[in-house]
Amino acid sequence: MEVSVTVNGIARSADVEPRTLLVHYLRDVLGLTGTNVGCDTSSCGACTVLVDGRSAKSCTLLAAQVDGADVTTIEGLAGADGLHPMQQAFHECHALQCGYCTPGMVMAAVSLTDEYDDLDAAGVREGLEGNLCRCTGYQNIVAAVLAAGE
Amino acid sequence: MTETPFTGGIVGESRPRREDPALLTGEAKFIDDLQIPGALWLACVRSPHAHARITAIDASAALGIDGVVAVYCGDDLADAWEAPLPCAWPVTDDMKNPAHYPVAQGKANYAGDIVAVVVAESRYAAADGLEGVVVDYEPLDAVVTIEDAESDRVVIHEDCGTNVSYEWPLVPDPDAVEAAFADAAHHVTETFVHQRLIPTAMEPRGVAAVPAPHNGNMTLYSSTQIPHILKVMAAITLGLPEQKIRVIAPSVGGGFGCKLNVYAEEVICMALAQRHGVPVRWTEGRTEASGSTIQGRAQRQTIELAADADGKLTAVRATLLADMGAYLQLVAPGVPLLGAFLYHGLYDVPVYSFTCKSVFTNLTPTDAYRGAGRPEATYAIERAMDALAVAVGVGPDEIRSRNFIPTEKFPYDSPAGLVFDSGNYQPTLDRAKELVDWDGRRAEQVDRRAAGSTTHLGIGISSYVEMCGLAPSRTLAALNYGAGGWESATVRILPTCKVQVVTGVTPHGQGHETCWSMIVADQLGIDPDDVEVLHSDTAISPLGMDTYGSRSLAVGGTAIWMATEQVIEKARAIAAHMLEANADDLEFAGGNFTVKGSPDKEVPLAGVAFGAFTAHDLPEGIQPNLQAQVTFDPSNFVFPFGTHIAVVEVDEATGAVELLDYAAVDDCGNQINPLIVEGQLHGGIVQGVAQALWEDASYDADGQCRAANLADYLVPSAAECIDMKLDYTVTPSPSNPMGVKGIGEAGTIASTPAVMNAVVDALRPMGITDITMPASPMTVRRAIEVATGGAS
């Protein structure tokens, strides 16, 4: 079936099997491999992207479900003038180590800070509950999200 | 004692990492990101039974599925293997090591054992193919517990004749042990169980084998910690010429030990790539990983302490029963040995005894998981020290202070036969107590108890020392390990005075590129951004022993430091020639060679580098180019140490444990980049806390994992974690010229007993002296009910 999605501002279209997951559409069909897969139970959040501006786990959506939608992946975050403020904050706060959860974590954090403008540390921790990181112990991730929000 | 050799002002700075931009933007390529034209996809048919005879395999339905290319069972691939999958650590000469073939033949020995593989044109078609392979099994009784294994009720590997793989004693003086316990004023005996843990690197494993059928080359991409070791082992397992194999670890999304192995899927992809003449790749699913990737811990330990009337330790005796799982993986038998020397912790104990028995079960194989042996040892001694404090009637801080190895005893000849390089333990305890307001918390605890509160405060100490920087090759030989512990580095200065560092250690999140560039830049007086670090590809870095055991800095970094020093000495000879001066009269600082007493006579390193490149006018006997290769074999382990204190609150009504505060004071000697030290500790501490409170790869009586995926296996999220308070002392190691020690595993080693001591501290007034890990609400609540004589 034909699935048309605007990804990072560019209209994309492809003929895919109806069962194709959004994450595989992004990775295998469009070649946008920044979005990672870390589990098979919608638990880890490594595959988090923005669908119409809100965070979504792309392993839990069929590509067909987002036909006509606007999707932003980690590749669409940095601009010509450098890293997005959230990416920059992650860098400065040492909020990543192996970096595998990072694209999903950053996208979830962007969505979270877009949605709430008075986040404290507890709010960040609760808001990122759906994204797992095995390296950082989260302390510097929380610091980065708070720093990016300032 | 070595102080810091660094004067360039770069080492010791908290510098954000150069690795980050690629990882933050999706530019970094992990294994599954690689675009490999023409690749076939592998999917593995895994036994759903923990123990079963394979009576028939019918692949006809699978072969009829669109996109499925082939199906192979164990017998079909039997001729692909020159040797079984390797175990590199035969700890005893009579260790039982059953042949472990990549695809099971005749019998499956754990749920997850591969019984057939499907090769297909796409990942979806390969998954479809799995559904079409019909396997008939005759289920057998499964051996699930180590006690059942030890009994030999069911012998898993008939040719071994027993489930016991090996017994390994370390008892330097048996008579002294008996005498010490006979004379002891206090004799504490504690038994603890370390549950199975799933390492859970966020990136699942993955493999892509890319053949060149006509010239015989084979490139193996794998999400591995050990490309160098994997190359040797793959050559042996497949009978391929080693020089034809190239192994590349792309960006690797965490390891924690679970990618320190030679796995079935790696050699299966290679064998099938050879057979089909096209690339074959596989990406692990998370649920699949519970049966395809090693697990950690899984030990039962008994520790006995003998002490005099003042609580001064006179002997430690530890006995261990360790679960190897269904087969021996790469270094699994050695994991208990890495803890075997440390069951007396950082305490001055004259008499020591350690014995270990390791058994097979019908469960996923175990192997090294972050800390590997040292968390287990630290847990035993630190939990037992709290029990001793109670027996003696002193506080847990006081019992430790009475027994710390005195600073003046370093280097310390340990009763287990090691030489602890350097240590100064008391300041870490003092500082950690300050950070958690020890006295204030103790007062609060008393107040709560007096007020009859049902939310109990617990405060737990864990002081630790660990041995890392694996490892002196001669020590490994004494432990029967199959390889050495050296590390290689090449440092070359390019014609434009940019630098390439080639290292044999293999990062998977540690920030090696940042740290190695800082070391070299500090030594050479140049910008770290002018230093490129090359690694993780056996064609670029042909010599290496890879990354595990907190060895990268202490061993690999030392090789880099030494190679850079050699480059400087060569540059000095060339500079002396250029300046018409004696090499001994030259000073090198800030990237310039100057003549002592004649500051106007100078040549920058850039000039020397270009001169070494053109080779137009080199001194006699000096070869062109500035380059040095060093292979460093350490003379000793390094021994980081510290004290962690956890403060928890236990809700009597629900059994819920909440972490309220956490302080860690660690000493890893000189620090290269404190930002990275902090990050290693944060993550390591949380991994250890997770063992104490949440994670549990438990199996049911049939050998099925109850927590096979991330919906059931409780890796903590940000919501369960808290901000930790870190501080440091600095006691340089005399074992290497940089005075450094490892810090990658310390957090995990220290934190589990700190939290469990806190949980037990909260509940001790009820008569509770142990809680089985993880201290889940149900476990804690049940313990309370038992202790208080029924449900309240």
Image (cartoon, grey):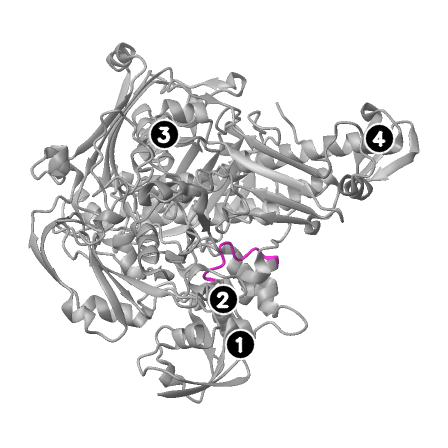
Q: Which residue is mark 4?
A: B577
Q: Are marks 1 and 2 in contact (CB under 8 Å)?
A: no
Q: Is residue B451 visible?
A: no
Dominant secondary-structure state across the stretch colored magenta: loop
Q: Secondary structure at mark 1?
A: helix
Picture disc at residue A103: 2
Q: Please name the residue shown 60% across and 53% down the image.
A: B17
Mark 3 or 1: the one toward you = 3
- Label 4 Cα neighbours within 10 Å, binned few <14 / some 14-19 / many ≥20: some
Spatial distance from mark 3 to mark 2, Cα to Cα?
Answer: 39 Å
- Residue count near mark 1 (Cα–Cα under 10 Å), binned few <14, some 14–19, many ≥20: few
Residue B665 pos. (x, y %): 51, 38
- Is there one chain holding both mark 4 and mark 2? no
| Callouts 1 and 2 in the same chain | yes
Badge 3 local density, few (<14 within 10 Å), some, or many (20+)? many
Q: Dot 3 corresponds to which residue?
A: B481
- Which mark is on residue A114? 1
Q: Nearer the viewer, mark 1 or mark 4?
A: 4
Q: Nearer the viewer, residue B268 or B595?
A: B268
Region of the chain picked out in magenta, as a range: A92-101
Please name the residue shown 10% across and 35% down the image. B152
As shown in the figure, which amino acid type bears the numbered disc 2? Pro
Give the chain letter at badge 1: A
Residues at discs 1 and 4 in contact (Cβ within 8 Å) = no
Camera-nearest label, 3 or 2: 3
> Can residue B558 be spotted in the picture?
yes
Q: On what subunit does the disc labeled 2 rest?
A: A
Return the x and y of residue B679 as percentages of the image width and height.
Answer: 52, 49
Locate residue B341: give its quadrant. top left
